[in-house]
Image (spheres, rainbow, N blue to C red):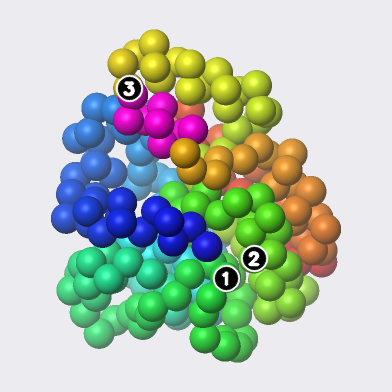
Amino acid sequence: MGLEFLDVFEQWADSYDESVRGNNREYKAVFAGYEQILEAVTALSMGNVVEFGVGTGNLTMKLLNSGLNVIGFEPSVPMRGIAVAKLGSNAIILDGDFLHFPEIMNVNTIVSTYAFHHLTDEEKEEAIAKYGKLLSKGGRIVFADTMFESVEDYNNSIVKAREEGFHNLANDLETEHYTSIPILRTILEKSGFTVGFKRCNDFVWLMEGEKQ
């Protein structure tokens, strides 16, 4: 489950918060409006929340500050350590990922930011199917991640990144499992969700699915 990218995050842990603040020129557009994206996910969350890909705990903090109950899963030891240090005893952050996590009950919302693209489309479908069984009617999936309106848009983004000299970004786009909105829509509807998408910046969309 995307664990082939784990080494990248173990190396990125100490500088991740600097990157999301826009201090990395190559990824500035990816993280444009970062705080507003986290706030949008938080605003759509309710009740007992499960967060996948906690990272350094930035979304977790907003969820907790909004009075929500949160259990977070993060497979990277360095990332998890930073999140625990940042959040203290206010949050439960455990080892786990989108597909492998302890049994959890009474979940109202499943959230994630900047992480779902680590799964292949087949793994995404497997994960959403799990969540469809975990959530009751009215339960929500709220993910913000890099995704594309079409395969053509995805390919164009790689070409543009290379033209701008952003070769690390282009390599990331080619290496990780970024997908398209039509594929994600089909996956969620197959597991009994209605779904909507809202653009947040040139790369990131907010995906909200509601269990029917």
Residue denoted by label 1: 99
Residue 185, image x, y percentages:
74, 47
Judging by the rendered image, the residue that carries numbered circle 3 is 166
Q: Pointer 1: residues within 10 angstroms few (<14), some, or many (20+)? A: some
Farthest front residue? 4
> What amino acid does circle 2 point to?
Ala
Badge number at residue 127: 2
**Residue 3 appears in which quarter of the rendering?**
bottom left
Question: What is the CA distance from the residue labelled 1 to the residue labelled 3?
Answer: 32 Å
Q: Is residue 181 above or below residue 5?
A: above
- Seen at 18% across and 74% down, the residue is 85
Question: Is 130 positioned to the left or the right of 33 in the image?
Answer: right
Residue 189 spot, x, y in % from top left: 81, 55
- For mark 2, does the 10 Å Cα neighbourhood hold few (<14), some (14 to 19), or many (20 or more) residues? some
Q: Is residue 19 left or right of residue 54?
A: left
Residue 171 is covered by the magenta coloring: yes
Check the picture and name the quadrant holding the C terminus: bottom right
